[in-house]
């Protein structure tokens, strides 16, 4: 079975058309320390379970969107545009 993602614009496609952008996290404020920025840019929780992630449709509409995915089963629960 192949891993499929449903692009909000293009519909269901192979994961090979997309680029993973990482888990969605709160961006630090402008007053944040260098350590806080480094953690935001490079550290990942990488927790097992359901997480909200960024995905980019590289070989399709070239837009960023969110996916809610269970990392233990690689099941995509829902996808939706980044504007929501």
Image: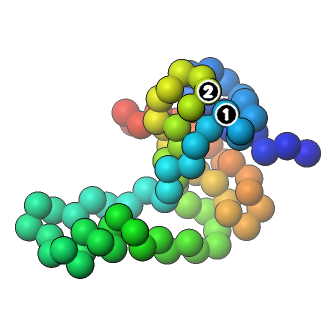
Return the residue nearer the eye: 38 or 65: 38
* Residue 17, percent from left and from top: 67, 33
Tell me the quadrant of the picture where the C terminus can be found: top left
In the rendered image, which residue does mark 2 sit on? 59
* Residue 34, percent from left and from top: 18, 74
- Local crowd size for mark 2, using a 10 Å CA cut-off: few (<14), some (14–19), many (≥20): few
The residue under the point 47% across, 29% down is 63
Above-or-below relation of 69 to 79:
below
Tell me the quadrant of the picture where the N terminus can be found: top right
Callout 1–callout 2 Cβ contact below 8 Å: yes
The residue under the point 29% across, 72% down is 38
* Precedes in sequence: disc 1 or disc 2: 1
Query: In which image quadrant can residue 26 be found?
Result: bottom left
Q: Secondary structure at mark 2?
A: loop
Total label count? Answer: 2
Above-or-below relation of 26 to 59:
below
Query: In which image quadrant can residue 28 be found?
Result: bottom left
- Name the side, left or right, on which 73 lies relative to 52: right
Query: In which image quadrant can residue 57 be found?
Result: top right
Outermost residue, bottom direction?
Answer: 35
Return the residue nearer the eye: 50 or 63: 63
Q: Secondary structure at mark 1?
A: helix
The residue under the point 67% across, 60% down is 70
* Residue 42, percent from left and from top: 40, 69
In the rendered image, which residue does mark 1 sit on? 17
- Local crowd size for mark 1, using a 10 Å CA cut-off: few (<14), some (14–19), many (≥20): some
* Residue 25, percent from left and from top: 38, 61
Above-or-below relation of 17 to 21:
above
Above-or-below relation of 16 to 39:
above
Give the Cα separation between the discs numbered 1 and 2. 5 Å
How did the renderer colour the structure? rainbow
- Name the side, left or right, on which 84 lies relative to 33: right
């Amino acid at each position: 079975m192949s891993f499929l993602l449903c692009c909000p614009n293009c519909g269901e496609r192979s994961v090979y058309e997309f680029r993973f952008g990482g888990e969605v996290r709160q961006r630090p404020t402008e007053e944040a320390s260098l350590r806080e920025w480094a953690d935001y840019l490079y550290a990942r929780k990488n927790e097992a379970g359901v997480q909200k992630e960024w995905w980019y449709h590289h070989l399709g509409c070239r837009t960023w969107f969110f996916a809610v995915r269970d990392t233990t089963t690689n099941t995509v629960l829902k996808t939706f545009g980044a504007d929501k």
